[in-house]
Amino acid sequence: MPAASAQTRASSIRKRALPGLSFALALAAAPLSAQAQPRAAGESAVVTVEADQPGAQVHPDVFGQFMEHLGTGIYGGVWVGEDSPIPNDGGYRTDVLQALKDINVPMVRWPGGCFADEYHWRDGIGPREDRPVKINTNWGGVNEDNSFGTHEFMGFAQRLGARTYVSANLGSGTPAEASQWVEYMTAPAGTTALARERAANGHEDAWTVDYLGIGNELWGCGGNMRAEYAADLTNRFITFAKPGTGEMLKIASGPSDSNYEWTETMMKISGKLIDGLALHFYTRPRDATWEDKGPALGFPEGEWASTLDHTMQMDEFITRHSAIMDKYDPEQRVMLAVDEWGTWYDPEPGANPGFLQQQNSLRDAMVAALNINIFTKHAERVKMAAIAQMVNVLQAMLLTDGPRMVRTPTYHVFDMYEPWQGATVLPVEVAAPMYEKDDVSIPAVSVSAVRGTDGQVHLALVNVDPNRAHPVTIALDGVNPAGAAGRILTARAMDAHNDFENPEVVTPTAFTGARVSRGTVTATLPAKSIVVLQLR
Ligand code: AHR
């Protein structure tokens, strides 16, 4: 859970505009201060894209997913076992596998979360019927039968063609346990006793562990440590975690939200040994407490506005954590890995509150698009991220119920932004009118632009204003396309969502409203819409 200190909202994003005056904030690849430009309400948003000034690469793993032993995120949502009547491939749901392949999931993080620091990997290998049953003390107090363990996780990642992020237990485990797990997974076939044990359990060849998490939220559920102590332990664990095969990047447990002291200490003590520092930030309606976060559906416009206002703080958090990292790592070798992000509302009525089940609406799609635009802006430092969580938990891609499955609005955002995976950032400047509601005042239009691996320029245009369409004029430097086509995600209601009875209420449709003339694209973004265009 986020630390108490992290729950305090910084005031800097709160409404500052004087009555009657609207100022635009820009969201782009250059420093924010260099781009802020006034734009009166009702005027067109004005965007400049510098297609001839390519920036950093958007690492595909920014589109990573988090799966934890939590509720039905794994059991029922991904893993049903070979004997299930639900169609499966070796125990994995075929519908879920296919849906995730369709959005090209690049990386999956497992087994937690808070669960990781209570997880002992030996419980999850060998014949399933012999694996110990334990209690999942973090999430609902339910039985954990360990039927999904290392082999099952690796089999899942292999089926997806995804890179692997394994979180080791630092909080209640030992360096020896972690290093032996790494050896079990990565020692070349036949080389060590653990490699032979792996083979005896059904997998001869080494797997690749692309990322190793060194504990999770060590300031909280991972052990309630001081940063100095956590950093020392991180160094100790890293010293003994040596992969037998492949490169394995070590990700330290990082801050939540605005806990800049944690970043300072971790970078000072561990900055030379780690390859990444995690950042966790969960979006809620702005002034909500953890006890009363508000519902996922049926919320008033004030909660739409404050949720989007809150999520845009990601930009400030990344900027300020990155500035601290720059002091210790000016070469930007150490990545900021936003390995838990997304919305967190009150649990669904009637559901086990420990299962963190919530519906997913157009508001969540907005949160996803805004965050991907922010990650794109910070692509030099943010090289990996994982939305929490992939199936059935918090801001999920997919919801399941028995044999049924539905794609959420957030899933469709990941689908629409697929060209961002591995693309080159193109700097953008945005001058937009403000969307104002109660004490919230945020730019109505957010933009990111990339040159995809297909060589084409792609634009993402997000209108967060639920009441007004906003025209945009996009001047393109260094490219002169003949046309632009793409897709739009929008719906009638702010809380429009997909459920098992109505699975396609929020689904992308063709967007034909963009006009291109002499290096300028014009379009009108309908209220509360996400438009992704490809220039041709
Ligand atoms: O994603 C749910 C939980 O949120 C994770 O287990 C933990 O790391 C965070 O507090």
Image (cartoon, rainbow, N blue to C red):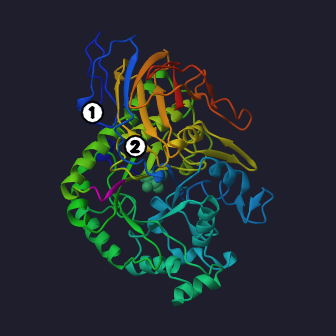
Relative depth, front residue between 493 and 426: 426
Callout 2 touching callout 1 (CB < 8 Å): no
Q: Nearer the N terminus, badge 2 or badge 1?
A: 1
Does residue 210 lie above or below 511 as drawn?
below
Residue at the image position 25 percent from the left and 44 percent from the top: 320
Magenta portion: prevailing SS class: loop
Q: Which residues are magenta?
A: 332-336
Q: Amino acid at mark 1?
A: Leu
- Identified by mark 2, the residue type is Phe
Q: Quadrant of residue 494?
A: top right
Give the residue at the far right of this rendering. Answer: 85
Label 2 packing within 10 angstroms: few (<14), some (14-19), many (20+) = many
Residue 132, percent across and down? 60, 75
User: Which SS class for mark 2?
Assistant: helix
Q: Nearer the viewer, residue 46 or 358?
A: 46
Give the image location of residue 283, x and y in percent. 42, 39
Residue 393 position in % (x across, y down) = 56, 48
Q: Is residue 310 left or right of residue 80?
A: left
- The residue to which callout 1 is attached is 32
